[in-house]
Image (spheres, rainbow, N blue to C red):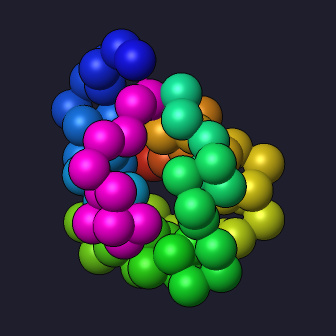
Amino acid sequence: MSGPGDELESSLTAIWRRCLAVEAVGPDDDFLDLGGDSLGALAILAELERDHAVSVDVFELMMAPTVRELAAVVRSKSAS
């Protein structure tokens, strides 16, 4: 398991660890494989909006189910 690629991925990794109550999250670990469910998704998205001022919906999380992929979504929304 490789580590996060940048500050955003590090932040998302920490959010996922807290919200999914897991000790280790790699940038390519899948949300569902880590035990993610609807409550975990809502918690992640709420912390993401609070910490990064970016609104991502559940569908976007399901289409980008890894930290690395979600970071790409956040970057694209932040750029617009």
The question of residue 18 being in magenta is answered with: yes
**Eyeballing the image, is 73 above or below 16?**
above
Give the number of marks: 0
Instruction: Name the side, left or right, on which 9 lies relative to 64.
Output: left
**Eyeballing the image, is 59 above or below 28?**
below
Instruction: Name which quarter of the figure residue 66 lies in.
Output: top right
Quadrant assignment for the N terminus: top left
Look at the image and tell me whether residue 29 can be seen. Answer: yes
For the stretch drawn in magenta, the main secondary structure is loop
Relative image position of residue 52 (x, y in whole percent): 30, 60
**Eyeballing the image, is 40 above or below 21?**
below
Q: At x 78% / y 48%, what residue is drawn?
A: 63
Instruction: Name the side, left or right, on which 75 lies relative to 63.
Output: left
Q: At x 40% / y 31%, what residue is drawn?
A: 26
Q: At x 24% / y 37%, what residue is drawn?
A: 10
* Camera-nearest residue between 5 and 29: 29
Relative image position of residue 8 (x, y in whole percent): 30, 38
Relative image position of residue 72 (x, y in whole percent): 55, 34
Segment tinted magenta in the rendering = 17-27
Look at the image and tell me whether residue 80 can be seen. Answer: no
